[in-house]
């Protein structure tokens, strides 16, 4: 049984997840280095699938490498680059290597990446992909062809609590739950009141669906402005950016803000953990985890 | 003859009104009379996470998100309740073989109801 499933289904422990840095070179040495940094804190770590429409080492290869080095992968599969055959092949490839955590995403558009001339695929959407992963766990492909024994996936997805249409996001979370997702990692959200409303709504209509909001550690206001200006679906109130940019010690103010957002998120209904992205700022990651009352695992 | 004529007639009627892409498996009634195939990602089960703060599309920044439009229309248009109830159903993957054919014929023959043998949902919808 995957540790993610064990912790989320059989305990009340707070579960922290993270993003494994994309792999472009440096071989296994780079995997080892990042695994050592992340292993003490995180139950599961996302093996991304061409994030932000940039090509990197593949999701499956990265997930296998992570697993080899003691990190439990949450293997993402996005719908942008692969048709339904390739997506099922990814799932079965994961199963072949004992990877149980599968996360299904729509994926950023190709125009977000460095090769915007690429043909976008989107043969199926993320909710259909979730459902297909669930179907595979019943012992068959989408075609009906038998898989014996059936893989045992622990299926998850993502949702953006802070993008319009706000009310519909809650219904969409339910839809993903019905399709087979057991938990949702949420997009970065700098509007605590929106996150609050989303979590309360989900807790009401899909009480078994677990939520893992994302918290991002930043050193100053610059990445906040970047996210606000350049990442569709992320909005950061100007007052929040100003709070950090006008502080005499931007790093400290950004850190304080992050801890506030994290602590608030952890009080919300259905929230079972946090997804931490840190832009590789090792020092603040350790401090952050200790400040949230966490101790290194083993 | 009808098989050749109807797609043409359907396209002439539906293109100007809904920007129909002739997927051959029309779901307009269940998506607030808004064609999901006009979403640049052709998402049939709701919006992606890239919808901008002003409600516009991630891919085409000066166009309103197709699913935002669909949701608003579902809420505000006087559509039959049964259509509104279908809004949250899990729509199956598109059958690419039906591209360019008449969804009217496919509706009558129930060809548009055919899904891959392994497809099933947990909520009783298609």
Image (cartoon, coloured by chain):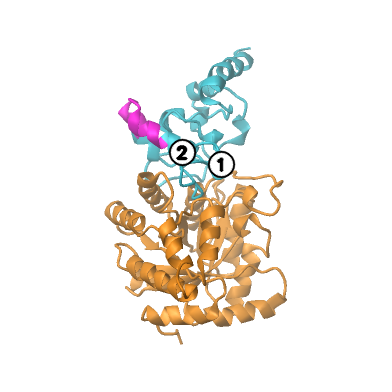
Chain colours: A orange, B cyan
Q: Is residue B92 magenta?
A: no
The answer to whether residue A64 is seen in the rendering is yes
Dot 2 or dot 1: first in sequence order is: 1
In what quadrant of the picture does the N terminus of chain A appear? bottom left
Residue B19, given in percent of the width and then of the height, sits at 55, 26
Q: Secondary structure at mark 1?
A: loop
Q: Which residues are magenta?
A: B71-84
Residue A87, given in percent of the width and then of the height, sits at 60, 53
Q: Chain of mark 2?
A: B
Residue labelled with disc 2: B67
Residue A258, given in percent of the width and then of the height, sits at 42, 70
Residue at image location 58% in from the left, 52% down from the top: A108
Q: Residue furthest bottom?
A: A298
Q: Residues within 10 Å of mark 1 (few under 14, many from 20)?
A: some
Residue A170, given in percent of the width and then of the height, sits at 36, 49
Q: Answer left or right for A101 relative to B12.
A: left
Distance between the alpha carbons at the discs numbered 2 and 1: 14 Å
Vertical order, A247 against B59 (above or below): below
Residue A51 sits in quarter: bottom right
Residue labelled with disc 1: B61
Vertical order, A98 against B86 (above or below): below
Q: Chain of mark 1?
A: B
Instruction: Identify which residue, A130 or A218, lies in the foreground.
Output: A218
Between circles 2 and 1, the one closer to the viewer is 1
């Amino acid at each position: 049984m995957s540790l993610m499933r064990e912790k989320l289904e059989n305990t009340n422990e707070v579960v922290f997840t993270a993003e494994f840095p994309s792999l472009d070179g440096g071989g296994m040495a780079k995997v080892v280095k990042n695994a050592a940094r992340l292993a003490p804190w995180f139950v599961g770590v996302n093996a991304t699938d061409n994030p932000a429409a940039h090509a990197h080492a593949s999701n499956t290869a990265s997930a296998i490498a992570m697993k080899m080095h003691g990190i439990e992968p949450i293997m993402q599969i996005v719908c942008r680059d692969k048709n339904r055959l390739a997506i099922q092949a990814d799932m079965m490839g994961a199963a072949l290597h004992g990877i149980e955590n599968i996360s299904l995403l729509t994926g950023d558009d190709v125009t977000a990446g460095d090769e915007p001339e690429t043909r976008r695929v989107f043969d199926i959407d993320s909710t259909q992909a979730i459902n297909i992963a669930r179907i595979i766990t019943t012992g068959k492909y989408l075609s009906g062809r038998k898989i014996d024994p059936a893989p045992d996936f622990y299926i998850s997805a993502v949702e953006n609590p802070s993008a319009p249409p706000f009310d519909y996001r809650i219904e969409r979370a339910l839809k993903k739950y019905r399709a087979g997702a057991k938990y949702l990692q949420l997009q970065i959200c700098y509007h605590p009141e929106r996150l609050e409303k989303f979590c309360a709504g989900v807790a009401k209509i899909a009480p078994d669906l677990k939520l893992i909001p994302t918290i991002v550690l930043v050193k100053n206001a610059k990445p906040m402005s970047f996210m606000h200006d350049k990442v569709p679906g992320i909005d950061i109130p100007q007052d929040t950016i100003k709070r950090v940019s006008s502080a005499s010690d931007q790093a400290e103010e950004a850190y304080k803000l992050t801890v506030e957002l994290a602590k608030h998120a952890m009080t919300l209904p259905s929230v079972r953990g946090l997804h931490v992205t840190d832009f590789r700022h090792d020092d603040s990651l350790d401090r952050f985890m200790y400040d949230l009352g966490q101790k290194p695992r083993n | 003859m009808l098989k050749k004529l109807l797609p043409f007639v359907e396209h002439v009627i539906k293109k100007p009104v809904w920007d129909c892409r002739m997927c051959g498996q029309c779901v307009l009634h269940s998506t607030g009379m808004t064609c999901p195939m006009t979403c640049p990602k052709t998402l049939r089960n709701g919006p992606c996470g890239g919808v901008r703060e002003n409600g516009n599309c991630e891919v085409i920044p000066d166009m309103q998100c197709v699913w935002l439009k669909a949701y608003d229309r579902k809420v505000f248009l006087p559509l039959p309740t049964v259509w509104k109830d279908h809004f949250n159903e899990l729509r199956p993957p598109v059958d690419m073989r039906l591209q360019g054919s008449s969804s009217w014929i496919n509706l009558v023959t129930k060809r548009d109801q055919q899904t891959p043998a392994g497809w099933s949902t947990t909520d009783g919808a298609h």
